[in-house]
Amino acid sequence: MEVLGLSVTQLCIGLVAVVVGACLQGSLGFGLGLVAAPVLVLLDTRLVPGPLLCMGVPLTFLIAWRGRRELDFSGIRWAIVGRVPGSMLGSVAVVVLAERWLAGLFAIAVLAAVGLSVVGLSALPTRRNLVVAGVVSGAMGTATSVGGPPVALLYQRSTGPELRASLAAFMVFGASFSLLALIVVGEFDWTDLGLASLLVPGILAGFGLSRWTSEILDSGYTRPAVLLFATASAVSILLRQVV
């Protein structure tokens, strides 16, 4: 039995990956693409990036709404300003550039930022830095479905609730705009929407679980988790290109 070309086994594996990814994103502010993208692309290349971006829209909205009182809108709005040209750049890059080199460049940039943070040279969420991070995140998210690390690294010293809410507010706009950009260039259609809808239950389940896991991270583990999963995001992107 198949649904939109996916077997029951593929669908079950995809749902598990989405649940784990959504739980991580609900706990840390990013992570859906990190966990789900490598699994989904192995199951069916049609699931990335369009359907995964589509699933990210309701998830980020729910996270932003849950943490709306901690939202740093005065800062994150500058990242949103950068996300617009970044998403447009990423959508064009998907069409005209070699994906392997593009993804590798993004991954190396994230690893460099993590390395600087580890030695105590992390950047602050200033207006300029947020705009630049927004541009990089927009291009990276549109091209690879993993766009959270650039902005998350700027907020790594914030409290857990502020980090989650601010990142979610940024990404609900960013994911929507990236999705629109893919529609404009013909990389997202009704079939992609149908594939995304099959996995939305996993989004809701993961979001529900994140209420408890976020409390664990808020006990002093937020910054180490940001650095760890930002590194894992970059490594996963590199591995996807090699494999």
Image (cartoon, rainbow, N blue to C red):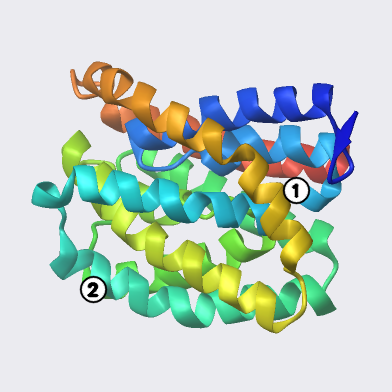
Provide the secondary structure element on which disc 1 rests: helix
Q: In front here: 134 or 203? A: 203
Q: Which residue is located at x 42 percent, y 46 percent? A: 59
Disc 1 from disc 2: Cα separation: 34 Å
Which quadrant of the figure has residue 97? bottom right
Q: Quadrant of the C terminus?
A: top right
74 to 68, vertically: above or below: below
Rendering coords of residue 79 (x, y %) = 34, 69
Query: Which x, y percent locates residue 63?
Result: 30, 44
Residue 155 visible within the image: no
Residue type, numbered disc 1: Leu
| Number of the label disc, if any, that sits on residue 127 | 2
Name the residue at 28% across, 29% down: 222
Q: Quadrant of the N terminus?
A: top right
Q: Nearer the viewer, mark 1 or mark 2?
A: 1
* x and y percentages locating residue 98 in the rendered image: 85, 67
Left or right, 238 with respect to 65, comes to right
Q: Up-down: is 68 above or below 128?
A: above
Instruction: Determine whether, in the image, residue 202 is placed left or right of residue 236.
Output: left
Q: What amino acid type is highlighted by mark number 2? A: Arg
Residue furthest front in the image: 1
Q: Residue at x 83, y 35 (%)?
A: 42
Q: Is residue 1 visible?
A: yes
- Disc 2: CA contacts within 10 A as few (<14), some (14-19) or many (>=20): some
Residue 47: mark in rendering: 1
Quadrant in the rendering for residue 50: bottom right
- Quarter of the image for residue 18 reads top right
x, y percentage for residue 180?
58, 75
Q: Nearer the viewer, residue 202 or 177?
A: 202
> Quick one: label 1 or label 2, which is nearer the N terminus?
1
| Element assignment for label 2 | helix
Relative to 36, residue 100 above or below: below
